[in-house]
Image (cartoon, rainbow, N blue to C red):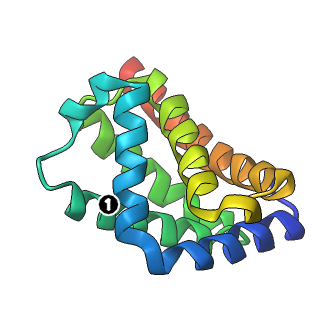
Amino acid sequence: MLTARQIDLVQQSFAAVLPLSDATGAAFYERLFAMEPETRQLFGTDLTAQGRKLFMTLTTMVDALDRLDRIVPVARELAIRHIRYGARERHYAAVGNALIETMRGTLGPAFDAETEAAWRAGYAVLAETMLLTHRAAAAA
């Protein structure tokens, strides 16, 4: 569960990143592919379009951080799509780390320890739901 302060930090920092979404999306995928090269095969060739999809999903998630009941169905659907693409459980940690590093690189000093902790907590909510869905699908 995120605190009101954490939600505010994520939403404010995300608002600062939105005008840079194309460059930030490109930086995210560059970091992800460096951390987990195997993930490259999960994405098409148009990484600009993929970055826009990433930001559409992030916008939905960030906007609903104070209404987790809205995030859970979206996260489950996202997990099911990613299973079809070939995502593995270990990829979720790489995505989280790439997201944190990308936010740090984009926001610079504004991405302080408190803001980072808020992003980690927010991503944990998303990743936990996706991993539970992933595991349930694998067991079925």
Which amino acid, by three-letter code, is at mark 1? Gly
Residue closer to the observer: 60 or 25: 25
In this view, 39 is above or below 52: above
Q: Considering depth in this image, is 9 or 72 the residue closer to the camera?
A: 9
In screen coordinates, is 123 left or right of 38?
A: right
Q: Nearer the viewer, residue 103 or 69?
A: 103
- The quadrant of the image that shows the C terminus is top left
- Say what secondary structure mark 1 lies in: helix
Quarter-of-image position of residue 66: bottom right
Residue plotted at (25% across, 29% down) = 86
Q: Is residue 97 left or right of residue 109?
A: left
Callout 1: few (<14), some (14-19), or many (20+) C-alpha neighbours within 10 Å?
many
Residue 22 percent location from the top left of the image: 34, 68
Look at the image and tell me whether residue 58 can be seen. yes
Question: In this rendering, would 48 be left or right of 78?
Answer: left
Expressed as whole percent of the image width and height from the top left, the position of residue 16 reads: 61, 77
Give x and y (percent) for residue 26: 34, 55
On the image, which quarter does residue 106 sit in? bottom right
Q: Position of residue 115 (x, y in %)?
A: 78, 59
In this view, the residue farthest toward the top is 139
- Check disc 1 and report the residue beneath it: 51
Residue at 66% x, 48% y is 125
Where residue 17 sits, quadrant-wise, is: bottom right
Q: Residue at x 71, y 77 (%)?
A: 12
Q: Is any atom of residue 77 visible in this view? A: no
Q: Is residue 116 above or below residue 12?
A: above
